[in-house]
Image (spheres, coloured by chain):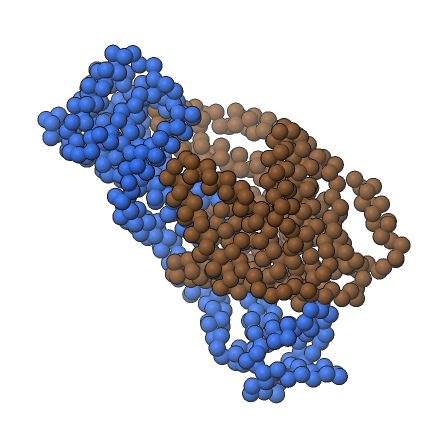
Amino acid sequence: MTSISEDTSASKEPSNTPKTQLDFIFYGRGSEFFGVWIVNVLLTVLTLGIYSAWAKVRTNRYFYSNTQLGEFRFSYLAEPMQILKGRIIAILVFGLFYLASSLSPIVNLIGAIGLVFLMPFLICSSLRFDMRMSSYRNVKFDFKGKYWDAFINFILLPIGSVFTLYLALPWALKRMDSFLIGNSYYGEKQFKPELSTGSYYLAALATIIITLILFAIFAVVLAATGSDIFNIAQAEGAQPEMSFAFIYIILLYILLISFVSAFYQAYIRNHIFKHTELEDVAEFDSQFDFVSLAWLQVSNLLLIVVTLGFAYPFTKVRLANYTIGRTDVIVLDNDTDVFDNIEQGNSAIGDEVANVFDIDIALT
Amino acid sequence: MVNISATLFRARSSRACSVSLSFSQNNCLIETENYTETIPIVDIRFRPGIGSSPHELSLPDGGLLSVPSKVELSPYWPRIAGDSLLTRFERSPIAWLFALVFIPFSLYVLINHVIPTAAKAVTPYVPQVMKAHIDNQALFVLDNSFLEPSLLTDEQKRSVNAIWSSTIKTVEQGESEFQLLFRQAGNFGANAFALPGGTVVVTDELVTLLSENPDALKGVFFHEIGHVKHQHSLQLISESAGTTLLLTYLFGDLEGAADLFVGSALTVIQNQFSQAFESEADSYAKYKLEQQGISATALADALLLIVGEQEASNSNKLSQYFSSHPSIKQRVEALK
């Protein structure tokens, strides 16, 4: 894997372009964002949710315009009304789906199948909206993924991999990431991922081994410390109910899942960034490591729980600092002009429907 | 006129150049060493920086001006006074304090009063067909997870059915909606539950436990019928749908594990509702039992037998929040 990366970087060398690593800094502060966030929540509650579209724009603008790459900040361009319209449609669709599916199992099934065919559309349109609303140096990003490509990569291959006993799943995951990144543009320049299938299999294998080891430790810890609590819970038998034992097990479980998912996330993100290039413009690097990432996620969750949610803005700023602090952008030529060729006028509909149905597609 | 230094990006280009800005009454003047441009202020879209991030000015031709946040630009765009008001709120500790008190309070009112009231208003209009569908679906899920087919003998079933029919006869209306089913429960233990359409399920364990005490079984039946009469499960379904929708809307962008936390908070809140439901079903049962000259202690006996006196005496505060039944002690007291 390392040899591949050396090979490709060597093949770029001949043109002998000077490389410059740009400073990548997040200027947001937890205390400052707390004010933005709490006013957002207050106005959202007071307007019974209508303000949430304005809140989303304000939050995104805060994070984008506090992120500085080289000498310049990013911008978030969406207008609240675009998002509000999308949300109204999303709520109507969500409400109808909920009502219909509680009416009968058959309608529920039809709705679920419809959702499967709707999903590739939602993925493409929400990514397109997000990218087109993001700009850097007055040049917008774009996403040009097609419906049927999304259908193959996000529906067909993952379902198909079930019939290979999930043996093909890492390959399918690699295809998904390649689809997401390879269809992304900055101005007219395309992002070019050269991901290795081997790395996805390695990541999957290591994740499974770590999961097994952690589950063994989980079982030992539970047997050593939890047996008494657990016995009491069983003695109560007559009424299965949430108790201390249940909370304890859930906490251990969250800890375990956080570690495992942090490992996979860190490994794959680093791989993607190391092997993606913005054609003729920039290379990337990422130094996530799984212990610090798991610690960040677990401590953020604890902060949110302990403060009943009020630490949320601080946890978001911590995450942004971590992400940006561990990402490098290396420009191949300092004087590249990147022209913008994107037409105006989109709606946020796809994005918002995806949000309400909780279909989470992460780029990293 | 004050000169402001800013960065200009021309339309469709990422090349940056430093410019100097100045404002007259109606116009904005953009100057570099070899170039000057005058643009009417009304044609420029001003987006004030949030916190300490730079202001952005979108020019009519698609160009972008980035101005440091220290520079005061709002006087030139008096129409967006709302934004500077927002900024003032965002920086004011008094506004924070108000929000810190007001947000939990209004969420509490919404979840505890507004949504339940709305749910109560909606449930009577749900048609019986839909409720019967819900029963079938719920039973299908339960049969495939917790419940096993009943192992009672035909004779046991016959005597329980006799008690059931004599109970049903006294229900004012809609007795055809009700049906009794037998299931074996395994871990679920001695219990009974009612589904919104009128399906009542008793576990073999409960039938065995109360075999010597037909009045107690009658009390349990009335309790379950009370749940159906008051549309409790339907109300719970509507409430959970409403609350989920509300919280998804407000905190839609929380990530995975935090979602779980919101979910368990919901369980706590909803279990508190259902404590009120239990009491309501108890008082229905009490009323019906006494109407037939049976003492309400019959139900109290059943409760004590089901839970075991031990748990009733040492139920603690925390488990009460997670438990769907109010402290058995309180319920037994209420029935006496």
Whole-percent x, y for residue B311 in the image: 31, 27
The answer to whether residue A38 shows anywhere in this view is no
Q: Classify the position of the C terminus of chain B by image quarter.
A: top left
Q: Residue at x 64, y 75 (%)?
A: B61
Q: Nearer the viewer, residue A64 or B323?
A: A64
B165 relative to A348, above or below:
above
Whole-percent x, y for residue B295 in the image: 13, 26
Q: Is residue B50 left or right of residue A309?
A: right
Q: Residue at x 19, y 27 (%)?
A: B168
Q: Nearer the viewer, residue B160 or B98?
A: B160
| Colour of chain B in the rendered structure image | blue
| Colour of chain A in the rendered structure image | brown
Q: Is residue A74 left or right of residue A277?
A: left
Q: Nearer the viewer, residue A241 or B290?
A: B290
Q: Nearer the viewer, residue B10 or A294?
A: B10
Q: Classify the position of the N terminus of chain B by image quarter.
A: bottom right
Q: Residue at x 71, y 69 (%)?
A: B13
A216 relative to A71, above or below:
above
Residue furthest to the right: A14
Whole-percent x, y for residue B69 in the image: 59, 72
Q: Residue at x 25, y 35 (%)?
A: B228
Whole-percent x, y for residue A51 in the image: 44, 61
A142 relative to B309, above or below:
below
